[in-house]
Each structure stands twice: as C-alpha cells, then as structure tokens.
Amino acid sequence: MTFTGILQIIAVLLIMVLAAVPLSRYLAHIFKYEPTFLDKLINPFENLTFRFLNVKKEEEMTWTTYLKIGLVINFLMLAVVFLILRFQNYLPFNQMHYPGIPWALDFNTAISFITNTNWQNYGGEEVMSNFSQMALVFLQFTSAATGLVFAIAFIRGIVRHEAKYVGNIYTDYIKAIYRIFIPLAVIFAIIMLSQGAPQTFTMQKKVVNITGTKQTLSVGPVASMVSIENLGTNGGGFYDANAAQPYENPNPFTNALTIFMMGTIPIALFFMYGIMIDDKKHAWTLFWVASTLLVVCIAVIYSQEAHGNPFLAHLGANIKASKYNPGGNMEGKQEHIGIAQTSLFASATTAFTTGNVDSAHDSFMPLSGMILLAEMMLNLIFGGKGVGLLNMLTMVIIGVFIAGLMVGRTPEFLGKKIGAKEVTLATLAMFAHAFIILVPFGIALSTAGGLAGIFNPGPHGLSEVLYAFTSSVANNGSAFAGLDGNTVFYNVILGFTIFFGRYVPIICQVAIAGALIKKKRIPESAGTFPEHGFLFYSVVLGTIILIGALTFFPALALGPIAEHFAMVKGHLFY
Amino acid sequence: MAKELIRMIKITLLLYVICSIAYTFFIWGIGKVFFPFQAGGSIIYKNSKPIGSMLIGEKFTSPYIFNGRPSYAGNGYNGTESSGSNYAPTNGKYIAIEKKLIDKFLIENPTVNKGNVPVDIVTGSGSGLGPYISIAAALDQVPRISKLTGIKEKTLRKLVVEDISGRQFGIFGTPGLNTDKLNLMLAEILKVKNKKLFKKVFSGLAG
C-alpha cells in the first residue's frame, strides 16, 4: 500500500459522498412530486408520455397492483429483448453476420439484464450485433428504474400511516427514467466519449500495426452503454473484459469516474430515504453502517493485492512497490490504472452490485476474493439501485426485532409496531437470498455439468462456482471469469437463480411496505428504542455481521480461506 | 384488464424506442459532431494507412523494441477477444507459465537481477489489450534495445523518461508507459539511425 494509493481511494469516496448529498435532495423532490430545476425541460415530454399511456399521474395504487404491474412490465421487456437477441441475424447493425443467440444463452442473458444482474456468459464483441447491444442498453435503463421504484414504494409504506396506496408505478417509473437516468446517462456518455470510448455503428476495424502485425479492433456504440451500465448499477459491458478493455475505460480518470457513476446514486438513495421519512439522523446512521463495511472491504482487498503473490516473488519477480515498479498482484490488472484504483473498483462493483470489472477478479488473491464474495452475500453495502436500500431496511427490521426480544418490548420501527407478519416477510427475504445461493451451489458441485465449467484447480475452483451463484443471486454480474458458464447447465441454472434471487426478496419487501402502510403511528415514548446514534448503529451492524457470517462462513472456509492457508504454506494446486 | 395490458405494452415499446434507439443515436450524433476521432475508436494514421489505436495495446515481441505485457486476448493482443488469463494465484500451471516468462525476461535482459523482474512485465493485463508497462519494465529493456539497435542507452533512457504517462490530475492511476507510443517514438529514432533495421522491425511504417 502506498500513500498516493490511499489518497486516491479517499479522494474518490469523498467526492462520491459530497455529490450524493445534493443528488439526494433532487431525488427526494422527484418522488415527492415537488418542482425541480429540470421541470421546464422535461415536463412537456413527461405530460406527452402520460397522455400517450393514458395514465392519470396522481391516481394511486395499492401495493399489490403496484407490484403486479411492475412485474408484468418486466416480463414484457424481457420478451422483447429475448426476441431481438434470438433473431439478431435478421436485424440491422450486424455487419459481422453474427447468428441469433442460442436459446439457453439468450434465456440467461435476457433474464440477467432485466433483473439488473448483467451476468454475461458471452463476450459482447464476439457474439452480439450492435443492435443487440443497444437492446441490452434498454434493459439497463428499465431494470435500474424497477429497483428504484420498488424502493420508493417501500419508503412510502413507512412514511404513510393508516393508508392504502403506495403510489402510481407508471408515474414513478417514467419519472425515474426521464428525470434521473436519461439526463445522467447522456452527460456521462459524453464525458466517456470525449475520453476515448467509441460510439459508432461499425463493428470492427482492421489496422496494420507499426510492426506489420494485422490487428482487428472491435468498436460499436460503447460510450452510450458505459454510462448507463454504471449509473444503473447494471455492469454488463460491451466487451468480454468489461472495463478492463481500454475502449470502455480508457484511462485512470475514467476509472475513477466509473466508480463515481456506480456509487453516487446508491449513496444518495440512503440520504433521499432520510429526507422522505423526515429522519436524517436515522439515514446517516445507516450510511455509517454501510460505510464501515465498505471501508473494511476496501482495506482488506487493497492490502492483499498490494502485497502480491508470494510464488512470483520466489521465482524472481519484484512484487514490492517502488517509484518505478507497481509491485503487488498485477495478474489481470491494468498497469496504468494501478493496484489502488483497481482494488477500489473491485470493492465498489461488488458493494454497489454493479458487476462491471476493470480487472480479472479470478486472479485476485484468495482473501480479496473472499471479500468480494462477502460484499455480494451481504448485498446491502449501499447496494444496487433501490434493492441495496431495501436489503438494508430488511436487516434493520430484523435488527430491531432482535433488540426488542432482548429487552422484552414489542419492536418498533420508525413509529410503527413491527408484528409477526413483517418479521416473517423480512426473514423470508433474507433466507431466500441465502437459500438460492447455497442450494444450487451444492447442486452444481455434485453434478458433472456443474463441475465441467471449473477452470482453476483446488479450492479456487470451488470459489469460482460459489462466486457464480452469489453474483447471480445478488444481481451483481461480475464473475470469476475462468468458469465456463456458457453451457446449457449454467445458462439455465443461473438464469433461474438470477430470476428468483431478484424477485423473491422484492416481493417480500413490497409486501412489508403493504403491511406497514396500514399501521397507526405511535408517538415516541421514553421506552422507544432510538433509531439513530451509536447503539442503533451497533445493533444493525452486529445483526448484519452475525447473520452474514453464520450463513456463509462454511462456504467461504472451503473456498478462499482454504486457498489462503494453502498459499501461505507454499502449496500449489494442479 | 385488457386496458391495463395495452398500457403495459405501450410503456414497454415506448421506453424501448427512447432508451435503445433514440438515446444511442443521440450520443452517436454528439460523437459525429464533437468527437469524431474518439467515436471512431481513436485510430491513428501514418502514410494515410490506419496503424491502430493508442488506447489498445499492440503485440510487441521483437527484441529490437519495447515489449509489452503477456496477453491472453486470443493469440495475444487480439482486438476482438478481450480477456485476462483468469489464472488463480495458487494454480500450479500458472506458476509454471510464470517461471518460463520470468526466466525468459532474465535471459533477454541480462542486466536485470533475479528478484528484480518488474511484476507487470511477466503478468497479463485484465483485457490482454492494455498498452501500458511500468517505468521499471521500460528501463530494464533499454540495455538490450541499445545493444541490438546501436542507439545510445542515454538516448533511449531519455525517450522513456519523456514518454512517462504520469498520474492524471496528479493523483489518479500509476505512472507507466504506453508501449504503442513509446515504440512509435523509437521508430522515429531508428529511422534516422539505421534505415535497414527500421524497415525490418517496423514493416508497418516502412511501406
């Protein structure tokens, strides 16, 4: 670890938090239907859209209607993209005459993108036409909006009392896309474009290098994808290597910018929540819980990667950082971006469940890999669009329930009594997440189809499979990419784990909102457990660590932890 | 219910047209007008022939020039198959490959001591297309290139130092050298110094 390295990490994190504060105010205005500075520009388009859709903006829905419409829209969008990919050979912008995407891969990919996962069992530049890439961009907008509007419905469930309605999903959806994602995507696409991300409808360009070597370069509408893939915490890149491909991430500045794009909205959503429920102290406490976890994760990854691979040192490589030598574990990393920023990027992409990678996660040191896994297993270190906040609040409900049991009082959450129904749903959401990761993981390890995809030998191979299921269920999308996932077995099983990993928790969480909204608000009393401050912070953090560790420790012990100790002992795997 | 379904189909198609088609074309238009060079892939031309992009690494393995990092993109620096090696740090096969790479670097650059091989020059980048190497990796190759080309070590060292891409805004990234640029500069020097060797090594520029 170097001083400049630590400075870079702190600078990026600080800028993100500073930008998230004003952004959160803007977001709160949007979803409280208050005027914003973009009204003059966007109102005409928005009103036209509502007229076209025949939607009355203020007509509100119950949580069941809200949820149903959201899910059906998701299904329709999935169908559109499935068909475009399947029949891309009949569609435009396919200069390379790529054939239609095979059904299993198509099934996996379409589900993966509508659920904000962006797990990719394909290399974009090798199989996708530009038209198909553009169709995936459509889902990158809408899946981000889906997560966000469900979080908004949840927050309204907390804010409103003795009420029935959680809002109008069409209104929220259109506002999220028109007022947040499109303006930001345009701005950041232009910045990325100026830095070197291509934006063309050509697919390949042939050149002859200075040494006479022929080289073919894959290009396409990259800039427009890079911005929304990160702003929407989607993570599915244009290229196989995602942001490690220089066209997607030309320089260290764009690398920092990419981290900024991933993290700022999820952080802002925590603050927005504070504004909407009118309890900023509570939101800041949750911010500190997530920040604590994030900082610890970054520190472990950075120290592990900066320390490097002892086997290479033994062979004669210099893994110590100096003025001229980057040192550390450089396998799968971009030299110019460096260890510090790569560590931050990896931690951010798993914390914010983006899944975009600027390095090969499979080549990370064992304990770094463990942290990446842990970040996705917790899935609430700010997390993806909306769902990170939802998962955090689910954990808060479980936390106050446990705290309530300890003191022998009915648990309360922001002035509402937490009953059996809410706790059951919260537990179900949490349990489903673990269940959908670990059971298919076990199935994969005990079937030929699952074992066939493993690339690296020893415990690392087990980590590869664990990573695939964790990433898919957490709707992250990054991979230990050595694993060959493009088989019927993995395409289908991961397609299902992604699907259930996304929708089961969301359905439970929106149902919690439906239960909370009907409740009466009870006035604060001397016995009310404070929902901010150090005690609350400790309860939530403790709950997260305890539940997370109890659930996932055995799997982690068999994979990365075993690999780490083998490495320390100088043991290699063949 | 039918009315609701029509509404849902309408929002799906509308958002498809806006987010996929209109948005992509809008950014494409901006590229066309304001950033035509970047939008096309930052491809540069010499003698009116495209020689590549400074963003994408090229395969430099000849001993006369600055070599880049090992690449796992296809058969090496294949611009259509970006990929890292994905080898785990404890993979025995990987360590065997590393042994070969390190030994090869030590033999090719006898001035470098065992234990001092810059780690980046023997490991693959994340995409196999990164053009950058560390300052140490560039400086370590100077004696070899000088010996083979007859260009003074001092000249080459100056070339390296002048060509360092520092931290952006003084903070972001790690200093390093873009081998695409570095070898292009080297070609300029060699062209003057030894025309015959220039034509042999830089056949892409000679024609």
Image (cartoon, helix red, strand yellow):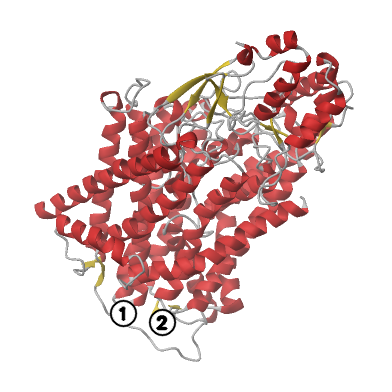
Image location of residue A565, percent across then percent down: 74, 41
Q: Residue at x 16, y 55 (%)?
A: A53
- Neighbour class for label 1 at 10 Å: few (<14), some, many (≥20)? some
Residue at the front extreme?
B192
Residue at the bottom extreme?
A526
- Neighbour class for label 2 at 10 Å: few (<14), some, many (≥20)? many
Q: Are marks 2 and 1 in contact (CB under 8 Å)?
A: yes
Q: Residue at x 29, y 44 (%)?
A: B22
- Whether residue A213 is situated above or below residue A494 in the rendered picture: above
Q: Is residue A357 left or right of residue B13?
A: right
Amino acid type, callout 1: His
Which is more toward the observer, A125 or A565?
A125
**What residue did someone put label 1 on?**
A161
Q: Quadrant of the C terminus of chain A?
A: top right
Residue at the left extreme?
B2
Q: Secondary structure at mark 1?
A: loop
Image location of residue A389, percent across then percent down: 45, 63
**What residue did someone put label 2 on?**
A415
Q: Secondary structure at mark 2?
A: loop
Q: Is residue A362 left or right of residue A522?
A: right
Q: Are marks 2 and 1 on the same chain?
A: yes
Label 2 or label 1, whichever comes before in sequence order: 1
Q: Specify the subunit that label 2 lies on.
A: A
Amino acid type, callout 2: Gly
Q: Is residue B187 visible?
A: yes
Q: Residue at x 56, y 18 (%)?
A: B47
